Amino acid sequence: MEELKALAIKKLEERGVTINDIALIVKDIQSIYRNISIDECIDTVLYVISKRETIYTILTGISLDEAAEKGLLDEKVNNLIKNDKGLFGLDEILALSIVNMNGSIALTNFGYLDKIKPGIIGKIDNEGKKKIRCHTFLDDIVSAIAASAASRIAHNVEEN
Amino acid sequence: MEELKALAIKKLEERGVTINDIALIVKDIQSIYRNISIDECIDTVLYVISKRETIYTILTGISLDEAAEKGLLDEKVNNLIKNDKGLFGLDEILALSIVNMNGSIALTNFGYLDKIKPGIIGKIDNEGKKKIRCHTFLDDIVSAIAASAASRIAHNVEEN
Amino acid sequence: MEELKALAIKKLEERGVTINDIALIVKDIQSIYRNISIDECIDTVLYVISKRETIYTILTGISLDEAAEKGLLDEKVNNLIKNDKGLFGLDEILALSIVNMNGSIALTNFGYLDKIKPGIIGKIDNEGKKKIRCHTFLDDIVSAIAASAASRIAHNVEEN
Amino acid sequence: MEELKALAIKKLEERGVTINDIALIVKDIQSIYRNISIDECIDTVLYVISKRETIYTILTGISLDEAAEKGLLDEKVNNLIKNDKGLFGLDEILALSIVNMNGSIALTNFGYLDKIKPGIIGKIDNEGKKKIRCHTFLDDIVSAIAASAASRIAHNVEEN
């Protein structure tokens, strides 16, 4: 899995998303509740990404975005994914495989981030809307990772 | 089911939540995307509440809130529910039975509403936090109904 | 959506799954509880497939299977999907977009069918395991459609 | 949490379910795939029960069963829970809070166990159907714990 984890992080970066970008969102949504260092956020993001479910979702979701970008899929499906209509919905479903593993706080944070699209989430969503690239699955995956990391921090803090 | 639906609406009102309160939240989150009348919001909220899953969740969730309020449950469980800690999580899970039936837009709206707590959601959450009443399950149920109604409106509009 | 529904049914048939194959599974799991005609099962399967979430999931899941079959995805992702390991898990998650819309009986039926793999589900799973074709997503999608149709029949019967 | 974990195990035993009963189901569904000792099954069941989500679900679900048994809830809700109709559905939803934390194999195992009801699951389901006690939530909770433990074992084995 170590090799696949490195590949997942490499693919995220190729698509324009760094661990630091995600950590900044985690720090931002946690800052209302507590003081937390960017390093702790980075460590938690890396922990969430080390899980098999997260790695598989990153690799599969980005593959779908790239395949649609290159027009490799059947025309109608290719358009479905490229257009990223609000009603498509499979991008959110795929991201649930990450969110579900991290408790109910992850679920509400995911819905929140998916709607307000802060930081890098808004940036890639915007690139997608402008048809610069296809990020239909990526923005939900990044929201899910950030929401899950925030949930883990909340759990750890409130437990101790 | 008609009888149980009427009971569910009656229980919501007994706990301080009217159909109109929920419809106002639906109108509010939809107003960014489209003009919509409060009557259409009310009709959609009533449609969501007419579903068996919604009725059962309203009746069961409010029963848990009331039982905890009256101290009818085992002390430790009673405290768990009354304290409504962010980590409890079963209130969000129970609300998923409503959200799941209404598509992925309902899911993201649910997380969003559960976090920003507009209108009546904030009011009952506040009553709960002040220990005036126990609304541990109710606020998530109301968020789920509003999120589901908003999702249905989005689907209907974008389909036509 | 009518056009996309026709395409979804066409793609299912191209991959070796007919509406009748799915209806036979529905009839089989319902036969323990009630007498039901194959025509009613076919109608219910067609109803489940008429839902947007089902259509999108069929088209996207089969596209992933076909892309992996043709080796169009990054090598590592392509292998992940082609090997269909029990731990992959995204095939079940994608199928949840169908199951979630159809109530809790759909959920338990889905888990059951995914494990015992009756009829056409076992046939395509076997073709996949023998590397004749890649059906990693298809078998879960067919299980989800059959489970959802069975759930709808149970609801309708027990309501009346 | 240690104290709450001990209480959850005590409540399970009061309702007629021992850790060993659950471990036997885990051993049974895993025996198709691998040789595994009952001790390893017991350890994994205890690990699953040590999670906050599991503890809260056990305590809340059993409280609902007991409250319905004693007739403490509103008459209509009390009957809903006591009758445990297949369409009620909230018992499965509540159990998802355990299943979701343990990956997709837990989900399919849960649906399978909830349907075939082996060992202690069938015993308590039967007690419930005979109105000896109310186990509406308990049988799904036990299925969820066994399914989650089996999923964890499958993950650990296949990873190494």
Image (cartoon, coloured by chain):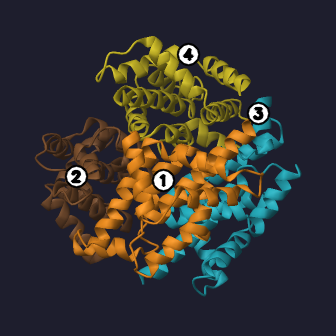
Chain colours: A orange, B cyan, C brown, D yellow
- Please name the residue that numbered disc 4 is placed on: D18
Circle 4 chain:
D
**Is A126 drawn above or below residue A144 in the view shown?**
below
Give the residue type at disc 2: Ile
Q: Position of residue C73 (x, y in %)?
A: 25, 58
- Between the C-alphas of marks 1 and 3, the distance is 33 Å
Graded by Cα atoms within 10 Å as few (under 14), some (14 to 19) or many (20 or more), the crowding at tag 1 reads many
Q: Mark 3 lies on which chain?
A: B
Residue C30 coordinates in the image, percent (x, y): 30, 44
Q: What residue type is labelled 1?
A: Leu
Label 1–label 2 contact, CB within 8 A: no
Label 4 element class: loop
| Percent coordinates x, y for residue C100 in the rendering | 44, 54
Numbered marks: total? 4
Which residue is depicted at the point 50% across and 57% down? Answer: B100
For the residues labelled 1 and 3, say whether their Cβ atoms are less than 8 Å apart.
no
The label shown at residue C22 is 2
Which of the labelled discs sits on residue D87, or is there none? none
**Badge 1 is on which residue?**
A96
Give left or right: position of C11 versus D45: left
Tell me the distance, in whole angstroms, between the alpha carbons under discs 4 and 2. Answer: 39 Å
Q: Mark 2, chain letter?
A: C
SS of the residue under disc 3: loop
Number of the front mark, 1 or 2 = 1
**Could you tell me which chain the residue with mark 1 belongs to?**
A
Q: Select label 1 or label 3 by which is in front.
A: 1
Q: Residue B73 carries which label?
A: 3
